[in-house]
Amino acid sequence: MEVNKIILTFSSLPQNVTIARMLASSLGAQMDLALSELEELKVAVSEAVSNAIIHAYSNAPDQFVTLELEADETKISIQVTDNGCGIPDVNQAMQASYSTDPDRMGLGFIFMQSFMDELRVESEVNKGTKVLMVKYLSHNRPSSH
């Protein structure tokens, strides 16, 4: 089984969200995902990377976000990691409409859960957050979906 792995570390600048989206979409296109699935992949990656930039680092451009993409013939795995402030209560953060920023709608994790087949969030206060998402190719999707 051939595995393609891409690791990109970039400054926590809002304009880099677009680069992360494009990279995920390009990998998804190689995997023959449907256009709707490519859009879902891009939204999920956008939300994870935006969360790192906006919430973990409070838009501090001198910090870094790491995006890891791994694809094989069955799935695409995406990991977004930051070394920011961390999430005190991951379960609370994953609830609809919860946000630490009053100008935000608090739907990032909801989109990730809806658009990906698996979502796991690991976080430690003052150490950072790791978001792991998996999208199975249609013919390999677990029967529970």
Image (tube, rainbow, N blue to C red):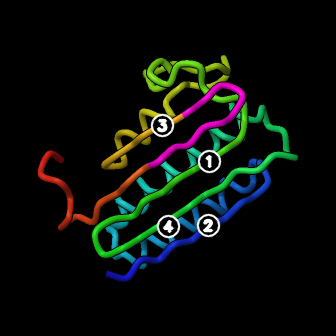
Image: magenta residue range: 123-132
Marks 2/3: CA–CA distance: 19 Å
Marks 2/4: CA–CA distance: 15 Å
Disc 3 designates what residue?
Answer: 121
The three-letter amino acid code for the residue at tag 1 is Thr
Disc 4 designates what residue?
Answer: 25
Q: What element does badge 2 sit on? A: strand
For residue 127, what is the image quadrant?
top right
In this rendered view, identify the residue nearer to me: 52 or 3. Answer: 3
Residue found at the far bottom of this picture: 2
For residue 82, what is the image quadrant?
top right
The three-letter amino acid code for the residue at tag 3 is Val
> Dot 1, how many residues are within 10 Å of its Cα: few (below 14), some (14-19), or many (20+)?
many
Is 77 located above or below residue 81 in the figure?
below
Residue found at the far left of this picture: 143
Say whether disc 3 or disc 1 marks the residue closer to the N-terminus: 1
In this rendered view, identify the residue nearer to me: 57 or 19. Answer: 57
Secondary structure mainly formed by the magenta segment:
strand
Say whether disc 1 or disc 2 marks the residue closer to the N-terminus: 2
**Residue 18, position as x, y percentages in the image:** 65, 58
Say whether disc 4 or disc 3 marks the residue closer to the N-terminus: 4
Rendered residue at 77%/48% (across/down): 12
Disc 2 designates what residue?
Answer: 7
Rendered residue at 47%/77% (across/down): 4
Disc 1 designates what residue?
Answer: 81
Q: Nearer the viewer, mark 2 or mark 4?
A: 2
